[in-house]
Image (cartoon, rainbow, N blue to C red):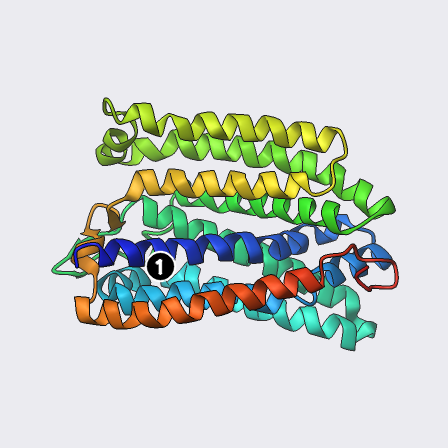
């Protein structure tokens, strides 16, 4: 039964990764929105995600609900510590969703709704990155409860991770549009993707250098011998993928930049795993210490085994149905 917390930790990590990738590209489109021409370009960008964006947020619900059910102690510690950025993220996602629908229904105020869509996307991405940074830098826990202050989440490191995720989402959005569009819009987002790639890689380097300095435990997990022989493969793989991404953008590849960006995010997730495992609240709680009773984990695992294939199937089917490029008429071909 000792493996159950690890299994649930892996499931939640998968849900977080799926959310970051799938909702990340439509948040990225919102971040890039002011850089696209009003009218046909913005409409095509919006139509590329219109059939998919609601379903993408399924993974956010799965990740948050799974954390509460499988690791209730971690949930009870993390939420009070990160109320401000989490509430900001949720409000921004709601605001963005309203703007998404109203820009079509209220064309007289479309510029205002477009601005709202961009602000909601930027704030949501920034809040998610800040949440990650605040978790990584550690949460003050005393007596199995949060014992820090209201502003503990706001530090230079959490702001760095916030800006880094905004840049990463912009790269995801740009490479998605490269894959889904043609003509002048495709050329525009290819140029934006090259800039976003530089920003993302630079931010990734800065976060990677800063993270081991946060804690001696992080330093040991990355650099202790012979562990470093394995952990060094992560930055090596990032270097190779970054080079392939740059070459793909230079030669005008269609779907490869998007796939390589996903791999880049997966490697970032692997680096996060190296830093945190086996802890779920760094410096305070391990997966086993925060886990629900084994009986609860088994009961929920049965439900997850049934529901996850269903979620993956309908999500995959939706992406298959809308797999073509978006024409000027707004339809997928």
In the current view of this chain or complex, which residue is farthest to the left?
143
Picture quarter with the C terminus: bottom right
Q: Is residue 50 left or right of residue 295?
A: right
| Residue 46 appears in the picture as rendered | yes
Q: Residue at x 33, y 50 (%)?
A: 135
Observer-nearest of 273 and 215: 273
Q: Along the line of sight, which residue is nearer the eye, 304 or 132?
A: 304
Question: Residue 321 placed where, x, y %?
Answer: 70, 64
Residue 9: % across, % down: 31, 55
Residue located 23% across and 30% down the image: 220
Q: Quadrant of residue 275?
A: top left
Dividing the picture into quadrants, the one containing residue 148 is bottom left
Question: What residue did someone put label 1 on?
Answer: 82
At 78% from the left edge and 71% from the top edge, which residue is drawn?
Answer: 109
- Looking at the rendered structure, the secondary structure element under dot 1 is loop
Position above or below: 141 against 228: below
Tell me the quarter of the picture where residue 67 sits.
bottom left
- Quadrant of the image for the N terminus? bottom left
Camera-nearest residue between 80 and 245: 245
Residue under the point 32% across and 38% down: 274
């Amino acid at each position: 039964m000792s493996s159950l917390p690890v299994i649930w930790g892996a499931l939640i990590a998968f849900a977080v990764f799926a959310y970051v990738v799938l909702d990340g590209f439509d948040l990225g489109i919102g971040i890039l929105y002011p850089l696209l021409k009003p009218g046909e370009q913005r409409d095509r960008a919006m139509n590329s995600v219109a059939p998919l964006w609601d379903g993408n947020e399924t993974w956010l619900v799965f990740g948050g609900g799974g954390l509460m059910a499988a690791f209730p102690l971690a949930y009870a510690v993390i939420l009070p510590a990160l109320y401000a950025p989490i509430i900001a993220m949720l409000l921004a996602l709601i605001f963005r969703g309203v703007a998404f629908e109203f820009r079509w229904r209220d064309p007289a105020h479309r510029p205002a709704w477009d601005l709202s869509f961009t602000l909601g996307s930027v704030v949501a991405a920034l809040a998610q990155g800040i949440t990650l940074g605040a978790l990584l830098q550690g949460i003050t826990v005393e007596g199995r409860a949060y014992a820090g202050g209201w502003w503990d989440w706001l530090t230079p490191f959490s702001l760095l991770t916030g800006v880094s995720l905004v840049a990463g989402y912009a790269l995801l959005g740009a490479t998605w549009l490269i894959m889904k569009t043609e003509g002048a819009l495709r050329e525009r987002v290819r140029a934006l993707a090259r800039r976003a790639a530089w920003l993302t890689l630079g931010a990734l380097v800065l976060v990677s250098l800063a993270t081991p300095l946060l804690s001696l435990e992080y330093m040991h997990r990355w650099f202790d011998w012979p562990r470093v022989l394995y952990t060094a493969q992560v930055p090596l793989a990032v270097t190779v993928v970054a080079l392939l991404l740059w070459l793909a953008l230079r030669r005008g590849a269609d779907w490869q930049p998007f796939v390589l960006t996903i791999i880049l995010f997966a490697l970032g997730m692997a680096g996060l795993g190296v830093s945190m495992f086996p802890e779920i609240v760094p410096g305070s709680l391990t997966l086993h210490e925060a886990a629900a009773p084994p009986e609860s984990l088994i009961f929920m695992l049965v439900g997850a085994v049934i529901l996850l294939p269903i979620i993956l199937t309908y999500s995959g089917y939706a992406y298959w149905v809308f797999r073509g490029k978006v024409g000027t008429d707004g339809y997928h071909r």
